[in-house]
Image: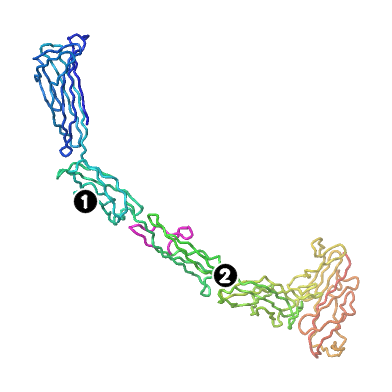
Amino acid sequence: MASKSLTLSLKSSSSTSAPYTHTVTLTITEQSQDTTNNRTTLSYTVEFKAGSSNNYHYNTGNKLWLTIGSVISSNEDVNPIYLNAGGSKTIKSGTITIDHNSDGTKTVDIYFRFRQTQKSAYDANTSDTFTLTTIPRASSVANATGTVGSPITLKITRASTSFTHTLEYVFGSISETIAINVATAYTWTPPISLADQIPNYVSGNGRLICRTYSGTTLIGSKEATLTLSVPDYTPTLTASVSATELKLNRCVQNFSKAIFSMSATTQYSATISYFTIDGVVRPNGYMSDVLASSGTVSWTIVVRDSRGKTASTVVSLYVYPYNLPTFTEALVQRCTSSGIPSSSGTYAAVSVSATISSIDGQNSISALKCRYRLNSSSTYTTVDVTNNDTTIIGDGNIDVAATYVAQIYVTDAAGSTTYSSEFILPIDSIPFNIRDSGSGIGFGKYCEHDDAFEINENWAVNMGMNLLMSGLSVIPVVASSVSGASGYIKYANGLTLAWKQFERDNYPITKAWGSLYENTNDDLTLGDMPNKDTDAEFTATPVVFASPSGGNSAIIASIVGATTTSWGRAWVVRGVQLANTEVRINLLAVGFSAIS
């Protein structure tokens, strides 16, 4: 218990240098505290002590003033005081009750004076304060931590056994009374509904309020922290995956896509924040890119709620492997009607082996075709061909005098088409050819274009050291003439070419010649050279080339009797005799004329 002492010293005279001789001491002590009534009882004593070498013998005139919170003595006689040197005497004692402030605190004012009226030097006083021990008032409640829906014990420390308490809480927007008339502890189960106040957190803080009563009088209140957690839980996740953009009612690599269905429920007013598929946030109904892998493809789906709680599952889809149709063999070439490769064939042999992906045995080849066209045309003729075999196409109509472009393509039941590379069916190789129009010449090939001078791409035309068509040197033309199906051309170095298309209708080829038939009459005179009587007339007999031209033309056995101005005569044969047939011969003469 607290105490306080104050001492007054009495001098022997009024001189400032006079020594102190006697003392008067006030001692105040907390005797007891009444917590219930919020007050303290103080005991006090006033003791006079004579100096060690001075007597104090005054039977009258001893006066005392004492205030402790309130006046106790005022000019009170405290006679007699008759003490020899060193002696002491209690001249005043007693108790006083002090009421505390409402919060239990209290500080009292002290005034203390002693006077001997017969000796003016013996007069001393002092003032001070005494802070009393605070009386506990409102009880304290301990911080509490628990889980909603589970009991927790609330503990109270009270100052008086007579105190009772009302416990209340505030959590989020909810404030309610827990209990009344509580002594020192109370077991309370926080309502599960309080979890709704923290939908985005696993725990939250509120306030506990303890109101202290003495009887029906409110002493005061104190607060503590209330920490409540949500019970542990896991969201419920439902997820599935299905395929879209199917082929043959199957989920197929490089065609199909995955669609994800995701839903979830959570607890205690939390909300679903998002779903992830393999770590990437995706919405319900998300559709993937085209599935590039085959076999069993799996995805991990995770749901996360507003409290950070998660649940996961794995969904899978079987993806049938798929590749575009492929060719293990693809070839198109000219051939005879029996399929024998031939540069002069009027048919085409299509050899093909195509493979497709199974797709669970549902796939098949829906189309396997060859398309071909004239090189000079964009219009195709398309025919079916047989897989793993050679198909003969063309019906004998693939002209040896024209270049064709052919291509094979395969389509499977999944709808994919693969095209082979293009195949060139070149024109037949012959010594030379004059177009039926007479406006084009081909060397080593059929001439395919009007107003053209064409040479087999595998040929090189040499004349001495000069290459006419190689691009190494260019020899200029100095004379030329074209009339119908005949004409000539002369180069600066004298090289001259002349050509003509000879025709004779209703001509008999009936004379037997071994297993063949030859012209009956020796009268296939071919006529004059077109450069006769010009500056391009040959100076020596040229080399003459001849080839048949269309229709029922005969095989040319030989050209005889050519001169510098005349083509000479033709001798022709056929495998079958004909009394009236047409003879068409392409003629070319190569030689030199005089250099101008």
Q: Amino acid at mark 1?
A: Ala
How far apart in space, not on screen, are marks 1 and 2 (Cα)? 71 Å
The quarter of the image holding the N terminus is top left
- On residue 396, the disc is none
Residue at 78% in and 70% down: 456
Start-end of magenta stretch: 264-284
Does residue 245 sit above or below 509 in this rendering?
Answer: above
Residue 541 is situated, as x and y percent measured from the top left of the image, at: 90, 73
Query: Does the magenta portion include 265?
Result: yes
Q: Which residue is mark 1?
A: 179
Residue 288 is situated, as x and y percent measured from the top left of the image, at: 49, 64
Does residue 51 sit above or below 260 in this rendering?
Answer: above
- On residue 321, the disc is 2
Judged from the image, the secondary structure of the residue bearing numbered disc 2 is loop
115 on left or right of 315: left
280 on left or right of 33: right
Q: Amino acid at mark 2?
A: Pro
The quarter of the image holding the C terminus is bottom right
Residue 360 is situated, as x and y percent measured from the top left of the image, at: 55, 75
Crowd tier of the residue under label 2, counting other residues whose Cα lies within 10 Å: few below 14, some 14–19, many 20 or above: some
479 or 118: nearer the eye?
118
Judged from the image, the secondary structure of the residue bearing numbered disc 1 is strand
Q: Which of the 4 image quadrants contains residue 77?
A: top left
Crowd tier of the residue under label 1, counting other residues whose Cα lies within 10 Å: few below 14, some 14–19, many 20 or above: some
